[in-house]
Image (cartoon, helix red, strand yellow):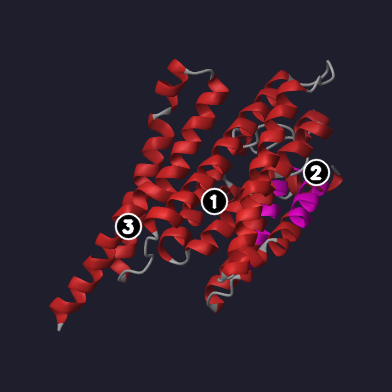
């Protein structure tokens, strides 16, 4: 806590505003948009790799949160003040940091995929800035951030072979998808059946249960999308640059509509947590199998544009 109190003492409005923007890069929305952009426009295999690291990392992160049940810094020390604008994004227990897990895992994947130097430089900057922002804003202690940082690095490095091409890598990817499904199902069972101590915060426990069902839906959707792609779709990711932008903007917009628009209808007919699992299952199916059905048209748009220019 001493380091957090030091950071609290040197906060300025300008730096706080910058850190509030930077910290958003560790959010669920940023992760999903970046992952589907890679999946849709760069490489399906790389997209599966990033999504797997994200989903498995979040399951590990959420399990550690509810197992250790470490309160947030402002609960540990009532005299400490979190930046209020960051409080809403700091749901659940504190240890380890979910934002750090997301950004370090995702940016390590990007770096290991060896894109251009500028992209690697941006990835490295976010990999360092977002974890620092979580401490600067008062959402996490150095221990929260440090453990999440190391776990994300290990997971991204361990799963890197799944991003390769070839039959061996494809076998590994299928194994990892099966393992992810079993782990996510086990986590749902754990948070649903385990008898937590009486002092467990009800709100934080509810957050853990919600996240468990959500992750289960995501992993199940990813497996279904992979099966559909292998057997029926085999969609292309190539297109001219402006068609790629159009593909991402329209697809991401529809994805966010599904995320927000199906929430109330599904909860009206299903219990809250299974409804969230179904909603995220449909989101991943849309991203991995439904929207890609339009990709041949985007590819033709590019070819048509080049042919008209000749």
User: Would you name the residue on which mark 3 appears?
Assistant: 247
Q: Residues within 10 Å of mark 1 (few under 14, many from 20)?
A: many
Is the stretch drawn in magenta largely helix, strand or loop? helix
The reply to whether residue 251 is visible in this rendering is yes
**In the rendered structure, which disc, 2 or 1, sits on the residue that comes first in sequence?**
2
**Residue drawn at the location 36% of the way across and 47% of the way down:** 290
Q: Which residue is drawn at 40% across and 60% down?
A: 234
For the residues bearing labels 2 and 3, Cβ distance under 8 angstroms: no
Q: Where is residue 266 in the image (x, y as percent from the top left)?
A: 44, 23
Would you say residue 171 sits in the magenta stretch? no
176 over 185 or under it: above or below: below
Q: Give me the C-alpha separation between circle 2 and circle 1.
A: 30 Å
Q: In this view of the protein, which residue sits in the foreground, 43 or 206?
A: 43
Instruction: Of the two numbered discs 2 and 3 on the same chain, state the one appearing first in sequence.
Output: 2
User: Does residue 10 appear left or right of residue 276 in this picture?
Assistant: right
> Which callout, 2 or 3, points to the residue nearer the camera?
3
Residue that badge 2 annotates? 5
Asked whether 132 falls inside the magenta stretch, the response is: yes
Seen at 31% across and 50% down, the residue is 250
When asked about the image quadrant of residue 141, the answer is: top right
Q: How far apart are marks 3 and 1 (CA)?
A: 18 Å
Q: In this view, does 77 lie to the left or right of 180?
A: right
**Res. 1 image quadrant:** top right
Q: Give the range drawn in magenta.
A: 124-151
Q: Name the residue under label 1.
A: 31
Image x and y of residue 180, in percent? 66, 46
């Amino acid at each position: 806590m001493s380091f957090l109190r030091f950071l609290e003492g040197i906060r300025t409005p300008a730096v706080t505003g910058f850190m509030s923007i930077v910290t958003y890069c560790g959010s669920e929305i940023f992760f999903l948009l970046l992952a589907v952009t890679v999946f849709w426009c760069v490489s399906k295999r790389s997209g599966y790799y990033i999504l797997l690291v994200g989903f498995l990392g979040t399951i590990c992160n959420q399990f550690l949160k509810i197992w250790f049940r470490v309160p947030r810094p402002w609960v540990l020390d009532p005299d400490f003040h979190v930046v209020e604008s960051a409080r809403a994004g700091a749901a659940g227990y504190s240890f380890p940091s979910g934002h750090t897990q997301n950004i370090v895992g995702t940016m390590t994947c990007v770096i290991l995929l060896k894109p251009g130097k500028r992209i690697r430089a941006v990835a490295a900057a976010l990999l360092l800035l977002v974890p620092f922002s979580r401490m600067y804003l008062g959402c996490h202690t150095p221990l929260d951030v440090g453990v999440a940082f190391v776990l994300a690095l290990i997971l991204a490095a361990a799963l890197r072979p799944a991003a390769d091409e070839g039959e061996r890598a494809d076998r590994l990817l299928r194994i990892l998808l099966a393992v992810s499904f079993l782990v996510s199902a086990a986590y749902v069972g754990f948070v649903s059946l385990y008898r937590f101590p009486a002092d467990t915060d009800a709100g934080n426990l509810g957050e853990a249960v919600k996240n468990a069902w959500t992750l289960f839906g995501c992993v199940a959707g990813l497996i279904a999308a992979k099966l559909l792609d292998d057997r029926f779709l085999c969609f292309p990711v190539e297109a001219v640059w402006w068609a790629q932008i159009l593909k991402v903007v329209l697809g991401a917009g529809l994805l966010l509509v599904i995320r927000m628009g199906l929430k109330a209808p599904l909860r009206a007919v299903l219990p809250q947590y299974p409804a969230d699992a179904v909603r995220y299952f449909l989101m991943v199916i849309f991203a991995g199998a439904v929207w890609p059905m339009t990709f041949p048209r985007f590819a033709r748009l590019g070819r048509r544009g080049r042919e008209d220019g000749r």
